[in-house]
Image (spheres, rainbow, N blue to C red):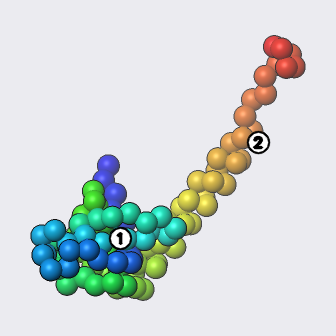
Amino acid sequence: MCLALPGQILSIDHDDDPLTRKGRIQFGGVVKEASLACVPEAGIGDYVIVHAGFAISRLDEEEAEATLREFAALSRLQDDKSAGADLHAPRPKGGVHG
């Protein structure tokens, strides 16, 4: 399964050479470095889709924020589901020592 995530460009290195251009990208609270070679038009503050260490396309802020909200909702749903599973997990019989 492949997953590409939207993130915002915080800074750009090697801006003079489009093939070695890299950026620090923020994904929520996580910051990672990614190649910007495929999006030469991207600048600081822009949102990009990152897959396997490469920013592969730009997207507008509204679309990026909507996608990030959906990821956050999925994460909360998974957390709620996991917490509910703990409540219904079978308890060991016989106390602490079995």
Please indicate whether residue 97 sits to the left or right of residue 27 in the image.
right
Q: Is residue 70 visible in the rendered structure shown here?
A: no
x then y, percent, for residue 62:
42, 86
User: In the drawing, what numbered circle is on residue 14?
Assistant: none
Disc 1 marks a residue whose amino acid type is Arg
Place residue 96 in its image quadrant: top right
Mark toward the start of the polypeptide (1 vs 2) = 1
Question: Label 1, on which residue?
Answer: 24
Q: What is the distance, in whole Å, between disc 1 and disc 2 at their CAs?
A: 40 Å
Residue at the location (34% across, 57% down)?
A: 3
Q: Nearer the viewer, residue 53 or 59?
A: 53
Q: Nearer the viewer, mark 1 or mark 2?
A: 1
Residue neighbourhood size for the residue with mark 2, other residues' Cα within 10 Å, grouped as few (<14), some (14–19), many (≥20): few
Quadrant for the C terminus in the image: top right
Say which element carries label 2: helix
Residue neighbourhood size for the residue with mark 1, other residues' Cα within 10 Å, grouped as few (<14), some (14–19), many (≥20): some
Say which element carries label 1: strand
User: In the drawing, what numbered circle is on residue 87?
Assistant: 2
Q: Is residue 82 visible in the rendered structure shown here?
A: yes
In this view, 74 is above or below 84: below
x then y, percent, for residue 54:
24, 64
